[in-house]
Image (spheres, rainbow, N blue to C red):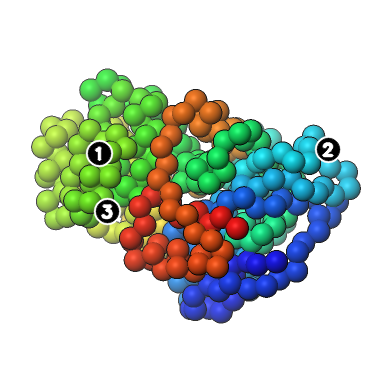
Amino acid sequence: MKAIQYTTIGAEPEVTEIEKPSPGPGEVLLKVTAAGVCHSDDFIMNLPEDQYVYGLPLTLGHEGAGTVVEVGAGVSGIDIGTNVVVYGPWGCGTCWHCSRGEENYCSRASELGITPPGLGSPGALAEYMIVDSPRHLVPIGDLDPVATVPLTDAGLTPYHAIKRSLHKLRGGSTAVVIGTGGLGHVAIQLLRHLSPARVVALDVNDEKLQFAREVGAHEAVLSDKSAVENVRAITGSEGAALVLDFVGYQPTIDIAMGVAGVASDVTIVGIGDFIAHAKVGFGQSPYEAAVTSPYWGSRSELIELIDLAHQGVFDIAVERFTLDDGVEAYRRLAAGTLRGRAVIVP
């Protein structure tokens, strides 16, 4: 079968021919119907050799959707032919966090060598993929898998980040979204649906700001040297109650801290680089401002997102690619020329 794999440190991924997998005990085989391309992929493929820990060759793709075509011994509760999306942050299933559905924070994953698909385990950028357990599958019914697969990360990650701060988003408050791409444009839609807050979006050019307005931002501001001043002109002295940074480079983190208000949440989602940091402390950050860096979301939150999708809440921008031209999707991702999310359709 065809797959898109990262095979050489520092090189582009490539389209390869690999053996079709068979499910072992407890596993499920999916015929892939859609797979998302993510900045996280680009990030790990730019790691130097001494920091790369994901194994080679690596079949990419941690956003996956598919149809169940075969199950291994002992699998029950999922029928052949079921259309599903894959919950990506696999855990042990038994620790305290996993028992709450928070496998993204599994306390034993590292110890047990459990890795997400596309980030250590074979991913979804292939004609077929193995899922380690049926509990990591969420049925989607008649939803379009291409439009739905971004919810498994580009939706789940901002949803988790926003939910933890909803109590701070009262009427008259402001939420700031920095970066309006794959995750950011979904975050804007979630904020408009879930909260009464005014949404201010930041990005680097007018085309991206117009896109932010189209998906629901009340205000759109260039992310430049005047960004803090211009956002503060909108929020006044109160500042933002929630700032979501989907970029994670030092300039955007500085903007995030500069527009945050007293007792706000600053959530750094983007993984721009490892050396960027927020200055936190007395006189360095607003009083009682909480700064955090979350990871993905829970299984129950993915189920909630699929329910919202059935209600027609989302208008997720996707650009479709085949497996044969999937490498071009990564080139476009790195160049910042994608509108929304790139989705590979085998």
Q: Nearer the viewer, mark 1 or mark 2?
A: 1
User: Viewed as shown, does residue 328 lie left or right of 22?
Assistant: left
Q: Which residue is mark 2?
A: 76
Local crowd at mark 1 within 10 Å, few (<14), some, or many (≥20)? some
Going from the N terminus, do you reach mark 1 or mark 3 first?
A: 1
Q: Residue at x 22, y 55 (%)?
A: 204
Q: Which mark is residue 213?
A: 1
Tell me the amino acid under the disc marked 3. Answer: Thr
Number of marks present in the image shown: 3
Gap in angstroms between the C-alphas marked 1 and 3 = 20 Å
Going from the N terminus, do you reach mark 2 or mark 3 first?
A: 2
Tell me the amino acid under the disc marked 1. Answer: Arg
Residue 243 at x, y percent in the picture: 30, 40
- Say if 161 sits above or below 321 in the image: above
Gap in angstroms between the C-alphas marked 1 and 2 = 45 Å
Q: Is residue 73 visible?
A: yes
Q: Residue at x 20, y 37 (%)?
A: 219
- Say if 218 sits above or below 280 in the image: above
Gap in angstroms between the C-alphas marked 2 and 3 = 46 Å
Residue 278 at x, y percent in the picture: 31, 52
Local crowd at mark 3 within 10 Å, few (<14), some, or many (≥20)? many
Q: Which residue is mark 3?
A: 252
Asked whether the residues under the numbered discs 1 and 3 touch, taking CB atoms below 8 Å apart as contact, a structural biologist would say no
Residue 88 at x, y percent in the picture: 61, 49
Local crowd at mark 2 within 10 Å, few (<14), some, or many (≥20)? few
Quadrant in the picture for the N terminus? bottom right
